[in-house]
Image (cartoon, grey):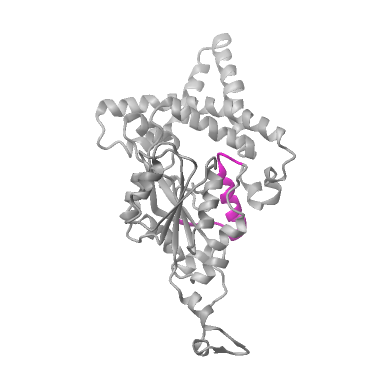
Amino acid sequence: MRATLAARGLYHSRECKPNKSARTGTATGRNIDNERLNRYNAPMRISVICTVLNEAAAVGRLLDGLLAQTRPPDEVVIVDGGSSDGTPAVILSYADRLPLKLQEARGANISRGRNLAVKRSSGDVIASTDAGVRLAPDWLERLAAPFTNVPAEELREGKYAVAGFFQPDPRSAFELSLGATTLPLVNDINPSTFLPSSRSVAFSRGAFECSGGYPEWLDYCEDLLFDFELIDCGGGFAWAPEAVAHFQPRPTLGKFARQYYLYARGDGKADLWRKRHLIRYLTYLVALPLLLALAVLHHPLWLVLLLAGALAYCWRPVTRLRSQWAGYSVFQRLWAILLIPVIRITGDVAKMVGYPVGLRWRRANRARPEIHWRSKLDSGQRYG
C-alpha cells in the first residue's frame, strides 16, 4: 500500500519509525520523549462528517449504514443547518449506538457545515459523506485502507487524500434512467483525473489544514474546489473504487432540472468548466439551428446528420442503462430508454440558464479575493 501511495505522490518518502534506542527514550544526538512516541504508535482514528438540513426522512439510512460498517467510525460529527422537520431528534436517537457529535449552525451552507464538522472532529482521518446515502458495509474500511501504514502523527501533518466512489440507488424507472444518463460507471473513471464527490472521500487532517477547508463563499460545486486544493497540497488522490456510497437520484424531472440549474450557477460563480459550457451553447444555439435550416432550405438529408449526433449523445447512457436494469420490467426498460433524450435536453437547458446567473454573481463580486482561486492553484489551470 505504501508503494501505491508513493506512486500517486501521497506517501511521503520520509520514514518515521523509531530505532531501537528511541524505544528507550534516546536517539543519536537527541532525546525523544515518550509522549511523542505514544502519539506516533497510536492507532489511526477516523471521523465521519456530514451536514444535514431537513433530512428527517433520509438521515436514518446513513446512520444505519454507519452502524453496519465493518470498520466502525471512531466518531460521527454532524452539523445541522437549522432543520425544522425533526432531523436532530432522529440523529440523537442513535446516540446510544454511535459515537455522535451533533452541532446546530442555522443558516450554514454545505461548505460552512463541513468545515465546522471537521473542526469539531478529533480523528486523524476525516471521511466525508452525505445524509440520505446508503453506504456499502465496507465503505469506511475500503476508504481508510490507503492510510493503514501511515502513522497517526504523520496523518496529522502529512497531506493524503483518498477518492471513493458513488453509485445511483434508483427507486423508479425515471431514477434508473437519470442515474444512467448523468453518472459514470466505475469503468468510465480515469483515476488520475477523477474528482471525487464529498459524499465519498477521505483526507488526512494535515491535508485539510493545508487546503484551507471548503470554500464557504460557494454554495454549489464546493467539493470540486476543495478537490483542487487537496490536489495542490498532496499531489492527487489514491483511488478506492470499492468504497461505494449509494444515493437516490432526483425523483422528478423538475427536481433534476433545479439541481442542474444550481450546479451550473455554481460553475458560473466559481468560473468552472468554461469550455464545456461554451460547447453546449454553440451546440444548441448555433449548430442545431444551422442543421435545421439546412434541412429545410437545402436538403432533408441534413436531418440524418442531426439524428446521428443525437444518437451518439445518448448512446453511452443506453449502455450504462443495460448494465443496471436487472429487476425492471420490459415496459420500465423501454420507458427508461425513451427518457434519456428528455433528461439530456432538460439538463442542458437547465445548465444554460444557470451558468449566466452564476457569471453575473461573479461579476458583481469580482472585488472579493477568494473568488479568484484559479490563479493560485496549479490544478485550477488543468481543470475547466
For residue 52, above or below residue 77: above
The C terminus: image quadrant: top right
Q: How many marks?
A: 0
Image x and y of residue 358, in percent: 63, 32
* Residue numbers of the magenta segment: 218-239
The answer to whether residue 374 is left or right of residue 63 is: right
**Residue at 55% in and 89% down:** 26
**Residue at 42% in and 63% down:** 145
The answer to whether residue 138 is left or right of residue 53 is: left
Image x and y of residue 108, in percent: 54, 43
Q: Nearer the viewer, residue 108 or 313?
A: 108
For residue 52, above or below residue 137: above
The answer to which image quadrant residue 294 occupies is: top right
Image x and y of residue 22, in percent: 52, 87
Q: Please indicate, yes or no, whether residue 275 appears anywhere in the rendered image.
A: no
Q: Residue 333 colored magenta? A: no
Q: Spot the residue most to the right.
A: 367
**Residue at 36% in and 40% down:** 58
Image x and y of residue 149, in percent: 45, 70
The answer to which image quadrant residue 181 occupies is: top left
Q: Residue 235 colored magenta? A: yes
**Residue at 54% in and 70% down:** 154
Q: Please indicate, yes or no, whether residue 359 appears anywhere in the rendered image.
A: yes
The N terminus: image quadrant: bottom left
